[in-house]
Image (spheres, helix red, strand yellow):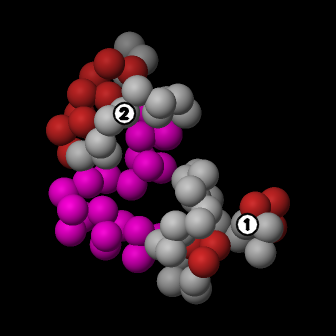
Amino acid sequence: MQTNERKNFCTCEKIKCPYHPLNHNQGCDLCVEKNLKKGEIPTCFFKLINQDTSNVKKFTIQEFVDFYLENKKD
């Protein structure tokens, strides 16, 4: 399936990742499960705040809180 044929809302650009919804039929479950086990948050949550995640070092919960506070719109 090509990127333009997506049937989900996933904004992650790492489409070669085995957990990406394009690579199986389990939706976001595998990605979210993997991230939670690692104490991380999926990329799509960061991109909801700001599409530019280039300054994010790790996608941890603390990094998300910091990212949110730095990018929130008042």
Dot 1 surroundings within 10 Å: few (below 14), some, or many (20 or more)?
A: few
Indicate the quadrant containing the N terminus: top left, top right, bottom left or bottom right: bottom right
Dot 2 surroundings within 10 Å: few (below 14), some, or many (20 or more)?
A: some
- Is residue 29 found inside the magenta-colored segment of the image? yes
Q: Is 60 on the left-hand or right-hand side of 50?
A: left
Residue on which the image places disc 1: 6
Residue on which the image places disc 2: 56
Q: Start and end of the magenta stretch?
A: 28-49
- N-terminal-most mark, 1 or 2: 1
Indicate the quadrant containing the C terminus: top left, top right, bottom left or bottom right: top left
Give the residue at x 40% y 27%.
Answer: 55
Indicate whether 23 appears above or below 2.
below
Q: Amino acid at mark 2?
A: Val
User: Residue 2's x, y, as percent?
Assistant: 79, 67
Which mark is in front, 1 or 2?
2
User: Residue 64's x, y, as percent?
Assistant: 28, 38
